[in-house]
Image (cartoon, rainbow, N blue to C red):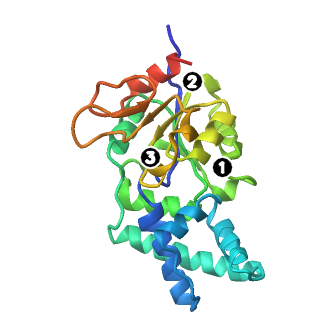
Amino acid sequence: MGRRLKALLWDVDGTLAETEFEGHRHGFNLAFKEAGLPWHWDRATYRALLAVSGGRERLAAYRHQQGEAPWPRERLETLMAAKQRHYVNLVGDGGLALRPGVAPLIAEAQAAGIPQAIVTTSSRSAVAALLGGLASSLSGAFAFWVCGEDVARKKPDPQGYQIALDRLDPSPGAVVVIEDSVAGLAAATAAGLTCLVSLSDLSREEPAAGFLAAAAVVDNLEPVRGPVKVLQGPACDQTRVTLSYLHQLLERR
């Protein structure tokens, strides 16, 4: 008998929903405007900043790039609070949606009694806004969330996944992580976990070499038509990624 899935861990931004460009980026820009800052992050600028994990860290990195002194912590927190408020409003206004295939896989794992958790660099308030606005019926599927506030070192560091493993207590060889980014993949694999990468609008433009450590790379968990498009890893002849495919990834370890 091959290895069987005992836990499923989910990233959030780019994995559950395409939040980066049309969610967080807009939230930052609205916060800049509100604060009277002469900043506007277009897609290219924000793409480059995403090499830095965490919103506060991105703000600090960008200010450094502009040759300006670091903000006092209170100023940084005020700006982040404004960004979060705008992000919550964007989600509430229906500006974002779960990616195809996400809800069916969460529901399938929940029905099978497989523990699930979230491991993300996003803040707890951002996760609460997303799940409350888009997946309230599925929020009970997650045993817990490991968010940016819960770790000292964000992805690509494996600390978030190590915390999740400690709380769930499964063998690392029985866990699958679903991620969308190179940093997320690096964090998962450094924790000894099998990782399925579902490419996002952001990571789809990354070199394929950055994802070689993934057990599989798919263009989407559920394509508009036809079987799942697998770019790396075992073929999937289903119309969406299911638990049987995740079991297959574990059995190949």
**Residue drawn at (62%, 66%), measured in percent from left and top?**
55
Question: Is 124 above or below relative to 71?
Answer: above
Q: Position of residue 212 (x, y in %)?
A: 56, 33
Q: Which mark is residue 196?
A: none
CA gap, disc 1 and disc 3:
25 Å
Labels 1, 2: front one? 1
**Front position in the image: 27 or 231:** 231
CA gap, disc 2 and disc 3:
22 Å
Question: Is 34 above or below relative to 60?
Answer: below
How packed is label 2: few (under 14 Cα within 10 Å), some, or many (20 or more)?
some
Q: Amino acid at mark 1?
A: Lys
Point out the tag, 2 or 3, that comes first from the N-terminus: 3
Q: Image quadrant of residue 73?
A: bottom right
- Residue at the disc numbered 1: 155
- Residue at the disc numbered 3: 140
Task: Label 2, secondary structure: give it.
Answer: helix
Q: Is residue 191 visible?
A: yes
- Residue at the disc numbered 2: 174
Q: Amino acid at mark 3?
A: Gly
Q: Image quadrant of residue 71?
A: bottom right
